């Protein structure tokens, strides 16, 4: 891995850690609002797939190893087996989905439209894996899992998606100008 790629990957890990610490608990669910998905959306658009996946996996591994980098400063393997574990386990799948959809669509449509479609598509496996895992762990119906883990988060995730796409567009434009 080249120095630039290593620095970008380390920055992704650091941003994931910071995004997890910015936590807004909701009274009706143990799944808090964090900025991790915003970081993943941006990184999956900006970084090569392998580099993005490496950063997300490193983040998960350092949390499992005991560093308090998961939401609310938690750590350990037990967090992955708790109510939020399905979401964290889906982070690599979310990033991969965004990157693949973006790669396919950016040749067929505008970069902005491709990025929007990609982040929307990437949230699907996140919500499916997270809510299915939540339903199993919490012994609730799929409908209740949807009402507790998906529906309340849609407006905020739409805002995060706009922020990620806008940030990607700005950073991408700035990098292109600098390379000239």
Image: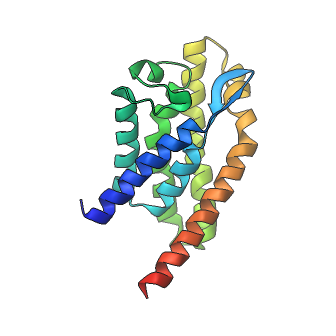
Instruction: In this rendered view, identify the residue nearer to me: 35 or 107.
Output: 35
Q: Residue at x 55, y 43 (%)?
A: 19
Q: Residue 57 at x, y = what percent?
A: 37, 40
Q: Residue 7 at x, y = what percent?
A: 34, 58
Whether residue 32 appears in this view of the structure is: yes
In the rendered image, the vertical position of residue 169 relative to residue 92, given as above or below: below
Dividing the picture into quadrants, the one containing residue 24 is top right
Question: For the view shown, which residue lies furthest in the left direction?
Answer: 1
Q: Residue at x 62, y 51 (%)?
A: 120
Q: How many marks?
A: 0
Instruction: In this rendered view, identify the residue nearer to me: 160 or 124.
Output: 160
Q: Residue at x 65, y 14 (%)?
A: 140
| Quadrant in the picture for the C terminus | bottom left
Q: Residue 178 at x, y = what percent?
A: 46, 82
Question: For the view shown, which residue lies furthest in the top direction?
Answer: 139
In the rendered image, the vertical position of residue 43 relative to residue 56, given as above or below: below
Instruction: In this rendered view, identify the residue nearer to me: 151 or 61.
Output: 61
Whether residue 125 appears in this view of the structure is: no
């Amino acid at each position: 891995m080249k120095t630039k790629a290593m620095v970008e990957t380390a920055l992704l890990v650091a941003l994931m850690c910071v995004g997890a610490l910015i936590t807004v608990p909701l009274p009706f669910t143990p799944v808090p609002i964090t900025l991790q998905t915003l970081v993943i959306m941006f990184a999956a658009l900006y970084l090569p797939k392998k580099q993005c996946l490496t950063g997300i996996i490193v983040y998960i591994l350092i949390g499992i190893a005991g560093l308090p980098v998961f939401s609310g400063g938690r750590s350990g393997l037990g967090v992955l087996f708790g109510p939020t574990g399905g979401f964290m386990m889906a982070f690599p799948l979310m990033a991969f989905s965004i990157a693949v959809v973006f790669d396919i669509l950016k040749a067929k449509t505008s970069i902005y439209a491709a990025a929007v479609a990609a982040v929307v598509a990437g949230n699907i496996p996140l919500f499916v894996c997270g809510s299915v895992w939540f339903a199993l762990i919490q012994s609730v119906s799929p409908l209740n899992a949807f009402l507790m883990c998906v529906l309340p988060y849609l407006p905020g995730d739409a805002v995060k998606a706009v922020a990620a796409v806008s940030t990607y567009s700005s950073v991408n434009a700035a990098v292109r100008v600098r390379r000239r």
